[in-house]
Image (cartoon, grey):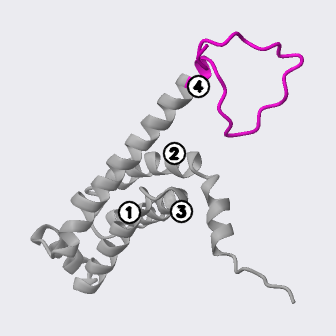
Amino acid sequence: MSETTAPAANTASATPVSPGAVVAGPATARGRRTRVALRGLQVLLALFYAIASALPKLIAHSSAVGPFEEMGWGSTGMYAIGALELAGAIGLLVPVLQSVAAIGLGAMMVGAFVVQLTVFDGRHAVTPLILIVPLALVARARWSHNAELLRLLRPVRREG
């Protein structure tokens, strides 16, 4: 029998399932669809941040230069924000960085919202707010990756 057609085990005698373990049945298919949808969302967000947001800043397109000049940040601010957005887009695709990248991009969107309200009279203030929602979803769903990132960043202690 395959994993999805196996008869259900007696739940009274079954051993507890650890988080992240594969469980047979309808929950597995639903969980897989959820993971695929979340991954698709991450890819869409990464494409948006890399192509629609970072690229114009990094190539100094006129659509990006004007607003940064109006803010008084100039080309330095434009390139810095573009580089951070590109780093966040790449981070959304790297498993151990997904949550941290989403948190970082979300923080940038909070900043963008404030700038939209204070400098540009709220013309496009809703855009960063809309982007915060899927970023928060990714950050929460991929939160467990933060423990792995911390483990990788901790120095190895050698005894002796």
Sequence-first disc among 3 and 2? 3
Figure check: 76 above or below 135: below
Q: Residues within 10 Å of mark 1 (few under 14, many from 20)?
A: some
Q: Which residues are magenta?
A: 1-28
Q: Nearer the viewer, residue 97 or 106?
A: 97
Sequence-first disc among 1 and 4? 4
The disc at residue 4 is none
Counting from the top left corner in percent of width and height, residue 71 is at 26, 77
> For the residues marked 3 and 2, what is the alpha-carbon distance in whole angstroms?
12 Å
**What residue type is disc 1 on?**
Ile
**Side (left or right) of 52 relative to 110:** left
Quadrant hosting residue 91: bottom left
> For the residues marked 3 and 1, what is the alpha-carbon distance in whole angstroms?
11 Å
User: Which residue in the protein does label 3 denote?
Assistant: 100
Q: Are marks 4 and 3 in contact (CB under 8 Å)?
A: no
Sequence-first disc among 4 and 3? 4
**Side (left or right) of 148 relative to 16:** left
Secondary structure, mark 3, is helix
Secondary structure, mark 2, is helix
> For the residues marked 4 and 3, what is the alpha-carbon distance in whole angstroms?
27 Å
**What residue type is disc 2 on?**
Leu
Secondary structure, mark 4, is helix
User: Which residue in the protein does label 4 denote?
Assistant: 28
Please tell me which residue is depicted at 78% across the width and 82% down the height of the picture: 157
